[in-house]
Image (cartoon, rainbow, N blue to C red):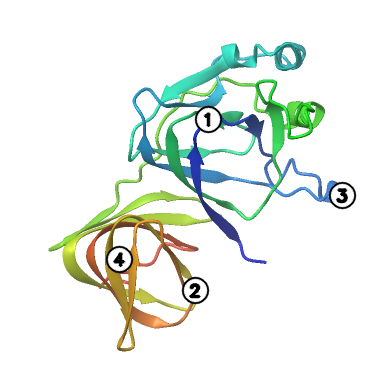
């Protein structure tokens, strides 16, 4: 099974409030899997926001009551977002993406999502969409969360740009590549694949004398062990890998 999922989410309206279990709180007998995820905000309209965790400690009874009466948003942190923001959604953190945001989401390869509240939306048949309140209450972290970004400022400066480590956890590691028109050599060893997500700009990848053009929105998978390849052009790319290589090993 491939270990991660990488998505673009274009939220034209606010999405449902939801939560994911951790590996420890998921139920294998129910087919559940843990799900940790990272959000990179590609663009955001003025005053766009997300809900991120509880703003105060809350009892299980009050949590259930506020979910069922539709007042749960009162107990959530509302965080205004801007392009370039980075957030890690810990399993157990109640959350939702607001309208007017485009987000790159990198996550464990799991579809286990418990929908907490959906603003009384109905499906195409006129029925309210399914909620998973009982299971959600079991895994929601009921302690308050202070919303913060998760930048890791390890950075390699290059003549033509920079490579910065945005985030790392035991499930995935994400580097940000900013290329201002140069040619950067990368090395993909046998310990991990490279997944390239083109956030903006354009350019091309070179591998064994062949050229592969790319532009914003493209996704490129580099199999583990192929060795060296090159990225040229003006672009911003998120590079997801399974490990953080030694300094100078990923980009040479």
Q: Is residue 207 shown above or below 82? A: below
Q: Is residue 34 shown above or below 132? A: below
Q: Dots 2 and 1: beta carbons under 8 Å?
A: no
Residue 25 placement: quadrant:
top right
The residue wearing badge 1 is 13
Q: Dots 4 and 1: beta carbons under 8 Å?
A: no
Residue drawn at x 57%, y 30% as measured from the top left: 95
The residue wearing badge 2 is 191
Upstream in the sequence, badge 4 or badge 2?
2
Label 3 to label 1: alpha-carbon separation: 34 Å
Q: Residue furthest right?
A: 29
Upstream in the sequence, badge 3 or badge 4?
3
Mark 1: give few (<14), some (14-19) or many (20+) Cα within 10 Å.
Answer: few
* Quarter containing the N terminus: bottom right
The mark closer to the camera, 2 or 3, is 3
Question: Helix, strand, or loop for circle 4?
Answer: loop
The mark closer to the camera, 3 or 4, is 3
State the mark number for residue 102. none
The residue wearing badge 4 is 247
Label 2 to label 3: alpha-carbon separation: 31 Å
Q: Position of residue 28 (x, y in %)?
A: 82, 50
Residue 215 as seen in the image, left or right of residue 53: left
Q: Residue furthest front?
A: 125
């Amino acid at each position: 099974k491939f270990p991660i999922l990488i998505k673009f989410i274009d939220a034209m309206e606010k999405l449902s409030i939801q939560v994911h279990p951790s590996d420890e709180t998921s139920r294998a007998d129910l087919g559940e899997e843990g799900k940790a995820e990272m959000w990179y905000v590609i663009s955001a309209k003025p005053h766009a926001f997300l809900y991120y965790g509880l703003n105060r400690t809350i009892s299980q009874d009050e949590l259930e009551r506020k979910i069922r009466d539709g007042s749960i948003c009162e107990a959530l942190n509302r965080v205004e977002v801007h392009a370039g923001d980075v957030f890690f959604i810990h399993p157990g953190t109640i959350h939702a993406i607001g309208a007017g945001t485009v987000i790159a989401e990198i996550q464990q390869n799991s579809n286990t999502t418990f929908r907490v509240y959906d603003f009384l939306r109905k499906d195409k048949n006129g029925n309210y969409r399914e909620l998973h309140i009982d299971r959600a209450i079991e895994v929601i972290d009921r302690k308050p969360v202070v919303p913060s970004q998760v930048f890791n400022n390890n950075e390699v400066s290059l003549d033509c740009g920079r490579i910065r480590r945005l985030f790392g956890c035991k499930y995935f590691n994400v580097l940000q590549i900013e290329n201002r028109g140069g040619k950067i050599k990368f090395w993909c060893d046998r310990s991990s694949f490279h997944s390239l997500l083109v956030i903006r700009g354009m350019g091309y990848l070179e591998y064994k004398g062949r050229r592969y053009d790319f532009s914003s929105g493209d996704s490129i998978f580099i199999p583990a062990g192929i060795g060296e390849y090159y990225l040229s052009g003006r672009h911003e790319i998120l590079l997801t890998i399974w490990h953080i290589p030694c300094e100078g090993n990923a980009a040479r």
